[in-house]
């Protein structure tokens, strides 16, 4: 949590990347993670694949299905993370759905997170109210930051409530939609980013959902601390595999708008 | 009226229920939560709901004393004939209610999920009635095996969209409907077909379907002098017809409440949909309940011969009624349901839906005594299942 917090405090235009554990191959998790660090990504979200990912669009759904077919499990993910402990220094966030965490056992889950240097969690179907009542103490006592989502429809009062419970950043969902790459920013989206900026929140914001290329990344960075790329990267893995050079050039293009030499 | 089996403010029945939903759905769910009781208790809603149920759907549905079936079981079997409703099942009670709510809340676009197509047809019907846009999500597999209902929905003007993920059945259609709602938060109303999903849906759908038990009470009183039968028996997938059949009897402990779950090819066959018998606590479609899952917390694919019971979870009210012991849930296999369907057809001249046949088959597991009054809800008619009946009962 501290590592993530200090990163958010000292750096702007952060680039974070989401990828699904165990995709495209069961042993891709480590390879992709190391390649992303080498490529200069600031932090990562590792997706814990789930059978019923209801906040995800077709690209991430499909990657989850393949990961599960590959035999990916939470147990396997923690084994993979423990293999590379000490070799990767960028902050790691785990993103997924509540049911596998409940089944794994929340206490055991946070223990494993702590052991494997996980900084935070994004569980879209764990609402704020339930988090505060049942999970806050457990998460924070294990150094885990729970990351809240806000959308263009989230009322101002609720945004402020989420802001004060936030211990790292707020995940700004760019539009009313499930995950998926989209082109450009609409006037409505810009109005939403500006409106949130006027609230003078204490937590930094990262924008995700629909960040597909260098232009959208750069654009949202004008209004927030950085951006999270998900589906566009999963599409890259789908097409080009988990090859390190391919990943490095994808990130370079995302950061600079230019292809690698 | 029932009190102790009502959900608390956050939608929990004991440990089950709640609203485990992404932030994107919170404004819509909050809006519904703040308004559903106010609207449903308003005089204009009650008047419109009653009029449409009576004049459009054909309520009250008869409570029929099945003489030959009663002789067979040596007690009084009463059939609650939801199969005689417009559109052929109990589903229309709920869709009429929710479409009135949607209208009151100013929503112009209706989305729904469907498995066998009964809820899809009931939704497309009320959308045609109100002149509202209708999108129905249906698993690609179900679209193929339920062609007549797909045709009905299309004729009614609905846009039937295939759910292409997972097993391409009801669970996946529900995921797609939730994704649609996430993407269309302002103009869209999600018309859920069962007592499942995030609070307030389980409570709202149970209240709308409670017209069934309300009628059973006065019909029993008129016919026997006692409004309480000894048993109320209904099939359970998500559990909306059972919730509606049990509702007014929840606080009448002398009435034994029996739910019939689909055991599929047998509880331990790996091909089952019995979420009370075989499930464990977990979250599905926004609700904490009993569901069938792997050791890794992935939701498993259910199986039942009856598409309407083919759901890996169960409404949180039922999970609580089972845990608290207020209701008992029995498992019925495909074959037992088929036998019970044939028995009802040949003894009473009523072809039940495969779902309802599960409730009829559960009678064989009860220790029924002479003079006892047993109400069985016939949730739907069997027309949609004729292909299965022809094949499995070797009628061709």
Image (cartoon, coloured by chain):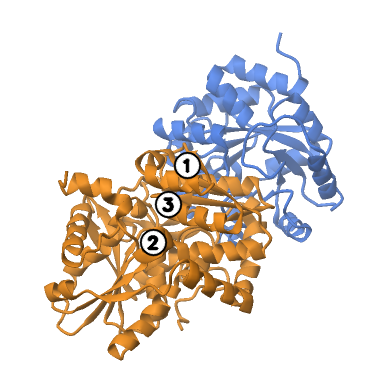
Chain colours: A blue, B orange
Q: Is residue B250 visible?
A: no
In the displayed structure image, the side of residue B292 where residue A82 appears, left or right: right
Residue located farthest toward the front when viewing the structure as drawn: B55
Say the numbered circle drawn on residue B89.
2
Location of the C terminus of chain B (image quadrant) = top left
Q: Which residue is mark 3?
A: A103
Q: Residue B167 or B188: which is nearer the viewer?
A: B188
**Do discs 3 and 2 share a chain?**
no
Task: Work out whether mark 1 precedes mark 3 in sequence or the reverse, and give the earlier one.
Answer: 1
Question: Where residue A23 appears, x then y in whole percent?
Answer: 49, 28
Say the numbered circle drawn on residue A50.
1
CA–CA distance between discs 1 and 3?
Answer: 12 Å
Callout 2: chain:
B
Residue located farthest toward the bottom when viewing the structure as drawn: B225
Residue at position x 41%, y 41% in the image:
B143
Give the number of the mark in front: 3 or 2: 2
Q: Residue A224 or B41: which is nearer the viewer?
A: B41
Check disc 2: other Cα within 10 Å, few if <14, some if 14-19, many if 20+: many
Check disc 1: other Cα within 10 Å, few if <14, some if 14-19, many if 20+: many
Residue at position x 65%, y 47% in the image:
B184
């Amino acid at each position: 949590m501290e590592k993530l917090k200090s990163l958010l405090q000292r750096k702007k235009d952060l680039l974070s990347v989401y990828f699904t554990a165990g995709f495209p191959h069961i042993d891709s998790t480590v390879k992709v993670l190391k390649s992303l660090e080498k490529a200069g990504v600031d932090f990562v979200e590792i997706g814990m694949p789930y059978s019923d990912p209801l906040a995800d669009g077709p690209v991430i759904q499909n990657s989850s299905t393949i990961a599960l077919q590959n035999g990916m499990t939470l147990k396997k993910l923690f084994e993979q993370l423990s293999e590379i402990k000490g070799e990767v220094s960028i902050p790691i966030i785990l993103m997924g759905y509540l049911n596998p965490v409940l089944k794994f056992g929340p206490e055991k889950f946070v223990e494993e997170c702590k052991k494997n240097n996980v900084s935070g969690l994004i569980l879209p179907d764990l609402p704020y109210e339930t988090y505060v009542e049942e999970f806050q103490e457990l998460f924070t006592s294990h150094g885990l930051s729970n990351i809240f989502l806000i959308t263009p429809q989230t009322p101002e009062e609720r945004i402020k409530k989420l802001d004060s419970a936030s211990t790292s950043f707020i995940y700004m969902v760019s539009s009313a939609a499930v995950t998926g790459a989209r082109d450009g920013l609409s006037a409505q989206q810009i109005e939403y980013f500006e409106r949130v900026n006027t609230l003078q929140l204490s937590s930094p914001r990262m924008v995700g959902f629909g960040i597909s290329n260098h232009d959208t990344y750069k654009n949202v960075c004008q209004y927030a601390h950085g951006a999270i790329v998900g589906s566009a990267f999963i599409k890259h893995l789908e097409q080009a595999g988990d090859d390190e050079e391919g990943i490095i050039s994808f990130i370079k293009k995302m950061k600079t708008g230019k292809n690698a030499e | 009226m029932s009190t102790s089996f009502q959900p608390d403010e956050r939608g929990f029945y004991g440990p089950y229920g709640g609203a485990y939903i992404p932030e994107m759905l919170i404004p819509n769910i909050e809006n519904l939560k703040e308004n559903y009781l106010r609207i449903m208790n308003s005089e204009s809603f009650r008047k419109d709901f009653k009029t449409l149920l009576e004049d459009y759907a054909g309520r009250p549905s008869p409570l029929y004393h099945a003489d030959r079936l009663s002789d067979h079981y040596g007690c009084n079997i009463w059939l609650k004939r939801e199969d005689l409703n417009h559109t052929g099942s109990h589903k229309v009670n709920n869709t009429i209610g929710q479409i009135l709510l949607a209208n009151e809340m100013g929503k112009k676009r209706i989305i729904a999920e469907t498995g066998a197509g009964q809820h899809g047809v009931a939704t497309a019907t009320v959308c045609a009635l109100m002149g509202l846009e209708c999108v129905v999500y249906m698993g690609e597999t179900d679209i193929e095996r339920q062609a007549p209902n797909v045709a009905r929905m299309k004729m009614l003007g609905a846009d039937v969209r295939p759910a292409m993920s997972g097993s391409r059945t009801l669970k996946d259609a529900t995921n797609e409907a939730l994704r649609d709602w996430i993407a269309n938060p302002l103009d869209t109303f999600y018309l859920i077909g069962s007592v499942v999903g995030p609070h307030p849906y389980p409570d709202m759908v149970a209240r709308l379907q409670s017209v069934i038990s309300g009628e059973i009470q006065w019909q029993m009183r008129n016919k026997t002098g006692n409004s309480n039968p000894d048993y109320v028996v209904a099939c359970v997938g998500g559990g909306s017809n059972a919730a509606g059949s049990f509702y007014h009897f929840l606080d009448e402990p002398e009435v034994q409440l029996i739910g019939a779950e689909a055991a599929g090819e047998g509880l331990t066959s790996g091909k089952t949909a019995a979420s009370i018998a075989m499930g464990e606590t977990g979250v599905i479609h926004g609700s904490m309940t009993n569901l069938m899952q792997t050791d890794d917390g992935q939701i498993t694919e259910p199986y039942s011969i009856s598409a309407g019971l083919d759901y890996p979870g169960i409404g949180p009210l039922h999970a609580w009624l089972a845990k608290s012991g207020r209701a008992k849930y029995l498992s019925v296999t495909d074959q037992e349901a088929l036998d019970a369907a044939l028995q009802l057809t040949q003894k009473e001249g009523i072809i039940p839906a495969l779902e309802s046949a599960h409730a009829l088959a559960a009678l064989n597991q009860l220790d029924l005594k002479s003079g006892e009054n047993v109400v069985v809800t016939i949730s739907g008619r069997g027309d949609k299942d004729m292909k299965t009946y022809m094949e499995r009962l070797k009628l061709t």
